Amino acid sequence: MTELVRELSPIAHEIWDMKYRFKQPNGTPIDQTVDDTWWRVARALAAPERSDKREAYAAEFYEAMAGYRFLPAGRILAGAGTGRQVTLFNCFVMGTIADDMSGIFEGLREAALTMQQGGGIGNDFSTLRPHGAPVQGVGADASGPLSFMDVWDAMCRTIMSAGSRRGAMMATMRCDHPDIEAFIDVKRDPNRLRMFNLSVLVTDAFMEAVRDDSDWPLVFSGRVFKTVRARALWDKIMRATYDYAEPGVIFIDRVNALNNLQYCEQINATNPCGEQPLPPYGACLLGSINLARLVHDPFSGQARIDEDELGRLVTTAVRMMDNVVDVSNYPLEAQRKEALAKRRIGLGVTGLANALIMCGLRYGSEAAAARAKAWMGAIEHAAYAASVELAAEKGAFPLFDADAYLANGHASRLPKELRKRIAKHGIRNALLTSIAPTGTISLFADNISSGVEPVFSYTYQRRVLLPDGSHRTEPVSDYAYRMFRRLFGEEAALPEFFVTTQELSPRDHLVMEAALQAHVDSSISKTVNVPQEISFEAFRDVYQLAYDMGLKGCTTYRPNEITGSVLSIEQPAGSSPTPVVAATGASDSPMERASVLPGFTYKLKWPDSDHAIYITINDTMRDGRRVPFEIFINSKNMEHYAWTVALTRMISAVFRRGGDVSFVVEELKAVFDPRGGQWLKGRYVPSLLAAIGGVIEQHMLDIGFLSPEGRFIRGTDSSTEASSAQETSPVQHMTRAPAQCPRCGSATLVFQEGCATCMSCGYSRCG
């Protein structure tokens, strides 16, 4: 294999230092080098092996990771071998929510404990009675599942998951639940359920009713609450996701029919990004084979991946991941029992688009789909074979039933020789393959393409904050692009197989996903990016095509006014596609301060303080209107001095970036004081910081920065200029996501694999 990139790029080093490097509580590094990280993880995962083989396996595990060929999921890299009370599993599906108050709040408690240890969660809210249904013995009507989803949302905002990462949640609801229409529409309010991804559980019967345009009853506990036309309900789902990218669709009957464990479990929910449909208390254990690092003789007629080498790597990866089941902490005992009973793992791939490029194949083409399918088939075969060998050595998973396991589901489609070996020896892991989002670990692996997604852009400029508060920019380039330039020079034209997201049709995305799904026993996290100008009819056809192709679900992303601002690729006319990421509405450098600014000062009396707090917000004029520029907080109460100074400096720095800075309000209002909040003007405010957020929100409303509904209003001048620019310059619109990263401030957030991921600092939010 030709290795042209040996040293970590600055962004890869920073991702390691920020996300995966083991440090003391005071920040002093324990892992001195990336090599130390690999060895820490390798030795931790070798612990379940026999003592006389432990060091040999640790060395084998180290070799798999050290070349960035196998990438365990971030939870494993960050937590294994640290002794911290965190889980090494990325996500969980929580237990079935009982339809009574104690069951609901027990579910909330379990969700909070899980997220506290760093796990994302999925919940099916179909089990809760609909809004208006009678509550027996109380003489009242039910508030419905959406009201309790608001409670989950507030909990998630309060808990910062392990590793300073916000929790992520998935909520599902059946297509025949009486509140399904409200579920579909709930995210039209951009301030509601922001911590959730939403998906509708679509049945085969519903898809047949849509085809026939027949009636569709909405039912709970055997009672029909309402009857609608199936096609009208389907169009409602399609219109919602067309307008604001949610809800997604899960073809739940197909998920259960193809489940190896259908004989002992029922699935009604997935993890937050959808690649792991799981039963109650099911756990999501992830790792990825980096295909980009396995290509021999790249950009030549002999470019290939050696399947023997791939098989050996997969065998090692399966053993490593199986050991994670034994060494991980579990937030709940029910999760530990579920994991040990079935030993599910989710081995997938990343760097797929890069590997295809290096083999001269255009993403989305028939040839690329065939090659990707062959690679995934080899991974599947090697993974199942390795798990059979582990079963012979260590025992099959406890709920293994050979006849039931092999009779149905994905296992019934395995090659005959594999099925014979499973029948003879059993299998260690009930399910083995899944393709997950890999945004952050892909940056860590030298900016390879993420998961199974196409390349977003080949080059872009990254803003780096310096110790003195100033910024510098540095170029960031894609792994395969950088390799091509080193081989053929900076002036060489890029071949036609170098394509990016904006050049692909929705069908290109689905063709690739369907090719891989044939050899994935769980599911795939994939976003089908569609252009803003796509017609509703064509958009709706994407979902029908996904169903017809045999996919287990579908998630799309179309630029819209609710979920963020347009990210665009600047490409000079006639040039090769070497784009720079930019965002409309946000400046690359802070706004300059005028000598005189208009503003208002607000008096805030917090009941817990003897002295009033005075909040001054000054504005500047931009695009013909007032926008927030800076904030000052003053009080005679010196107890708050240090944090108010820090707060005003941080908020002012955000304001000066421009664009949609209303997320500041959202973050402040979500802060809960553990000592309790206060009642202000008849409304409970959970903390002083939340009260300050309320003042900022009212100011933004008063100056017209926010609409009465709380939505960011774009300036007419800027939108006119942007529209004109789109008509006269070769700008190609990309996916929609928040314009600026809330961590680093760079305008490099992209939406892929169900997550918003910053291409500059690796920040990721999947909820």
Image (spheres, grey):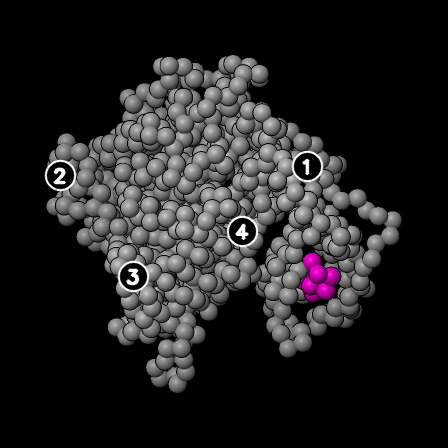
Is residue 311 or residue 342 the one in the foreground? 311
- Tell me the mark number nearer the camera, choosing from 1 and 4: 4
Is residue 137 or residue 673 the one in the foreground? 137
Q: Is residue 724 left or right of residue 601?
A: left
| Sooner in the amino-acid sequence: mark 3 or mark 4 | 3
The x, y position of residue 599, in whole percent, is: 81, 59
Is residue 71 or residue 139 the one in the foreground? 139
Amino acid, disc 4 = Asn
The secondary structure type at the circle numbered 3 is loop
- Label 1–label 4 contact, CB within 8 A: no
Residue linked to disc 3 = 213
The x, y position of residue 147, in whole percent, is: 46, 69
Instruction: Write down the quadrant of residue 684 in the picture.
Output: bottom right
Amino acid, disc 2 = Ala
Q: Is residue 290 visible?
A: no
Q: Main secondary structure of the magenta part?
A: helix
Q: How many marks?
A: 4
